[in-house]
Amino acid sequence: MAKRSGGLRFQPSGGERKAQVPVGKKQRLLVERMAHDGRGIAFQDGRSWFIAGALPGEEVEARVLSARAQVVEARAERVLRAAELRRAPHCVHAGSCGGCTLQHLPHDEQLALKQRTLAEQLKRFAGLEPEMWVAPLTGPEFAYRRRARIAVRWDAKARRLDIGFRAAASQDIVAIDQCPVLVQPLQPILQALPALLRGLDKPQALGHVELFHGTRSAVLLRHMAPLGEADLQRLRAFCADHDAQLWLHGAGEPEADQAGADGAGEPLGYRLDAFGLELQYRPGDFVQVNGAVNQAMVEQALEWLAPQTGERVLDLFCGLGNFALPLAQRVAEVVAVEGVEAMVERARANAEASGLDNLHFHQADLSKPLAEAAWAARGFDAILLDPPRDGAFEVVKDMRRLGARRLIYVSCNPSTLARDSAELARQGYRLKRAGILDMFPQTAHVEAMALFEMG
C-alpha cells in the first residue's frame, strides 16, 4: 500500500455538499494510522474516520457515533482482520466502559504512543527536542488506581438504580462489578456497592459515589436530599464491614460521618515512603490517582532539579505539598503557591505535622502574571511547577525575572507543555531532559516531566 502523507486529508471546499453520515451507520474500514488519543484513523470518501478500538493495519466494521463535515467519529464493533500487536483486553467491560480505551494495545506500545505524542507536540508547537530523552516512568499496569467515581442514576420510569461507570462516548452507565485498574482494597467495596445502594429507602436521592484508598479506604456519597436514619445506619454498617470511612456530601463541603465506624475521625492521607512523609487530604482535594508513579515522579523531580542545601526553591501549583514537603527536606527555604485557599491551608498543616518549618505557603491566582508578588521579590535558585491541563503560560512569562537557572515542569497536557516550553526557550532556557510519566496505564492520557536550564 502506498504510504499516506503526514496530514489528514479533507474534502476540498466548493462543489456539491456531501450527505451527512448518519449516526448508527455501520461502515467497513481499513485503518491506516493511529491518532494521539489511541484511536485508529481511516480515510474513505473524502472523510477522516477516527475509530475507537481500532489499530493500524486492521480491517474493522465500525459504527458511527457522530459526524461533522469531513470528520467521523466511530467505534469498532467487529475486527475483521486483526493487527499482529492486538491483545485480548484484560477487562470484560473494555469497549463499553469509557474508562480504559487502550486495553487492546500492549503496554509497551501504549508507552511508545505516549512518547510519540509528547515528541510531536514539542516539535510542532515549540520546535524543540530535549537534549536527552529519559525512559518512561512506569508502575503497575493494573491495580494502580486509588480513586474512582461511580456514576449513580435513578431511572424513574423503570424504577431502577443504575450504578457503574460512564459508557464510552455516551452518558449511559455501564454496570461494573470488577475493575482491574482499581487498587485491590477497593475491589470488594466496588463489588458490594450496587446491592447496598439499591437497598436504600431513597435511592433517588443519590448523586454519585467516590472511592478512595490511601492510609485508609473511604467511601464518599453525594446525596441530593437528606438521608433517613435507616439509610445512614446501612451505610455505616457497610463501611464498618469494609474498614472504610464514610463521607457524606450534601449541600456543603464533604464531611466525615463521625458516628460511623472506628477510625472515622482519623485523617485520610497518603504516604511518600521514600521521604518518610504522610500527606493528609479530604475528598474533593486533588490527589494523583497512581500512588506508585506519584512517588517515583517526586523522586525523579528532585533528582533532576538537584536542589542544594542553601537554596531557595519555588513550588507553583503546590496542592497539598506533594513536591514542596520533599523539597523542604533538601533546601534552606521553599515558597509554595497554590490557587485554592483550602489547599493552601491543608498544605500548611501537612508541613507542620511533618515538622518542617522552612516552608512558606501563599494563595495566588496563577492564571495571571506573578507581577510584583512580595513572595517573589527575592528570586529563586530553582523552580518546580505542576499546573493543570490549561498549563501555566501567564506564570511562565515571568520565569526569567525570578532568576532561577533550573526549572522542572510537570505536565498533564503535552500541547500546553509545548506552548509554555516555546516561551521558556524564548527567554533563554534550554530543554535538557524530557520523558513521559505513565500515570494512567490503559489510557492515552499523557503526563510528562521536563527539565529546563538557563543558558
Image: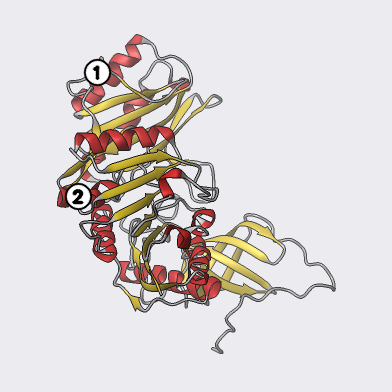
**What amino acid is at disc 1?**
Gly
Q: Is residue 85 left or right of residue 62?
A: left
Question: Residue 213: which disc?
Answer: none
Q: List the single residue furthest toward the right.
A: 15
Q: Position of residue 21 (x, y in %)?
A: 70, 61
Query: Foreground residue, 203 or 453?
Result: 453
Name the residue located 34 percent from the left edge and 43 percent from the top edge: 287
> Which part of the image, by quadrant, shows the C terminus?
bottom left
Mark 2: amino acid: Gln
Q: Residue at x 42, y 49 (%)?
A: 376
Residue furthest top in the image? 229
Provide the residue designation for mark 2: 329
SS under mark 2: loop
Q: Nearer the viewer, residue 378 or 60?
A: 378
Q: Position of residue 240 (x, y in %)?
A: 20, 23
Extreme residue toward the front, this view: 378
Left or right placement of residue 207 versus residue 220 in this view: right
Cα distance between the residues tagged 2 and 1: 37 Å
Picture residue at 24% right of the left edge, 18% below the top? 260
Q: Which residue is mark 1?
A: 260
Residue 268: x percent and y percent?
A: 25, 32
Q: Please give the count of numbered marks on the rendered protein.
A: 2
x 32%, y 41%: residue:
360
How crowded is the residue under tag 1: few (<14 C-alpha within 10 Å), some, or many (20+)? Answer: many
Tell me, yes or no, if residue 177 can be seen here.
no
Mark yes or no: residue 3 visible.
yes
Q: Residue 5 location, x and y as percent?
A: 59, 84
256 left or right of 68?
A: left
